[in-house]
Amino acid sequence: MDTDLYYKQPRPVRALEIEKLKLENHVLDGSGKRPVAISVVVPTFNKNDMRYNRAVLNVISTCGSLIDEGVIDEVVIADSSRTEDDKVDMEFMEFLLSIAIKYSKTFEKEVEFVRGLPEGKMRALQGRYDFSFRIQSQIDPELHRIYMEQGILSREEIEDLKNGKGANMWFSVPVTYGDIICFVDSDIVSFRKHYVKGLCQPILRGWNSEARRDEPQSSKAFTKASYIRLHKIPKGFKMGGRLSRLFGIPMFQVLNKHDVLSGLNKITHPFSGECAITRYAINKLQFSNGYDIETSILCQLWKEFGIEKMAEYNFGFFRHIPGDEDHADEMLEEISMALFYWLRRYGFIEGLGDFDSLIREYEEEATDMIDVYKRIAEKIPSRLTYGERQVREDRERIERYRDIIKSGYMRSVNNKPKLLRPWDDIKREVNLRRGYSYATLKSTLQDRVNKFTSNMILSYIRIYVDRSNRIISHFIE
């Protein structure tokens, strides 16, 4: 594996480059041609943690700058916070919207318009005002009512989908307006504007302006983030990304040798959550509501589009808030179970032969990767430590992961990920109804999120531009 892929710093992507690509290309819709639109979705959850709140501040404020620069067209904050009595956490949402008001001149002007003029207030309360920042609650009962009334989800399914990052992302798909949807996690400490610009650039460069709605929109359907994940330690940083480094990369290397999921071994950070995807592609995916969401999406994209339709963008050095070892082990079992589920579903399991032999191959490949990480650290000693202690920890993880992967393999025989229906399937189903259509459903869901955002600004909470600092300080200090 080429270690240069890991430590080479990214080329800055200028806002003008993205703006030019958006204007040079276009989308054909019912009203004619229009520029390509980009939506960013940020899943959030109140963890009552100052470190997390500061990371959220960084992500949302940076997205505010991207809106002001014309790089992106909207941000949907997909929040799953709730109070102890399972109600929407209005106080945390006040914090989220205060950040947007303070750091986006565009959104600040929109808020002033709907608060200050009867015309703006009326349009907002009717759900006809499209804010550049909108907030969707995963536990919004009115949103749930729409799904149940249209027979898309049952009450039992709604209860299951009140929790989970994957469900939160799935709910956001019909709510967004963009032709490209960019997902970014909210716990990224190092978040920079070039993350979003770099993820969207390959898709925009491959854009096909003559494509119909039922055709692929770009020669690149998907861009995934690549980076060196750093974790803070007393005397600098150590290498993070343990699940990608010690399971994802070596396992995909092994599978590639068996001509299985060929090409996914080239993905340098398979479990990164930051990605951009076309509307055409995202509607074909079964989102998972588990820790395996990135794995499940990657496998489906490989099957549906092939590795040549995927791109990577290197973030450079990357920091987020890491979980503990027990949490990582729990994630690994679910991820490995999902991977073997997709291998079974696509008919690859039989070709892999004896599982014990496969797991030995994995151990050898994972152990060999330790030397790769040593070389990476040697090239950037000022930024990264990978000494004897880290090597010992990784060797211990590989031994532990071996047993967890076995457990995931056994679980995959009778279990599958928590998969949600593709939006294309729902679209076909809804379009068969007399007097109703998917376009109507999508518009209704968008109006609901508009109303939810408007009601927060106008009624439920008291957000004023001059109060933003006070509200934000309460959550980060």
Image (cartoon, grey):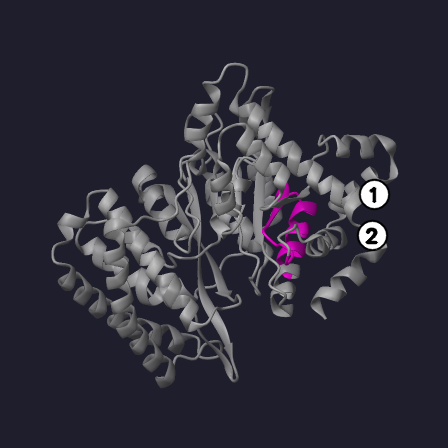
The answer to whether one can see residue 241 in this image is no
Residue 67 location, x and y as percent?
67, 46
User: Label 1, on which residue?
Assistant: 112
In magenta stretch: residue 76: yes
Evaluate if marks 1 and 2 touch, with contact meaning CB atoms under 8 Å apart.
yes
Relative height, residue 125 to residue 250 (above, below): above
- Provide the residue designation for mark 2: 465
As rendered, which of 71 and 242 lies closer to the eye? 242
Residue in view at x 17 percent, y 53 percent: 258
Q: Position of residue 232 (x, y in %)?
A: 52, 76
What residue type is disc 1 on? Glu
Tag 2: Cα neighbours inside 10 Å, few (<14), some, or many (≥20)?
some
Identify the image quadrant of the N terminus.
bottom left
> Magenta part of the protein: which range?
58-84
Image coords of residue 336 (percent x, y): 30, 58
Which label belongs to residue 307? Answer: none
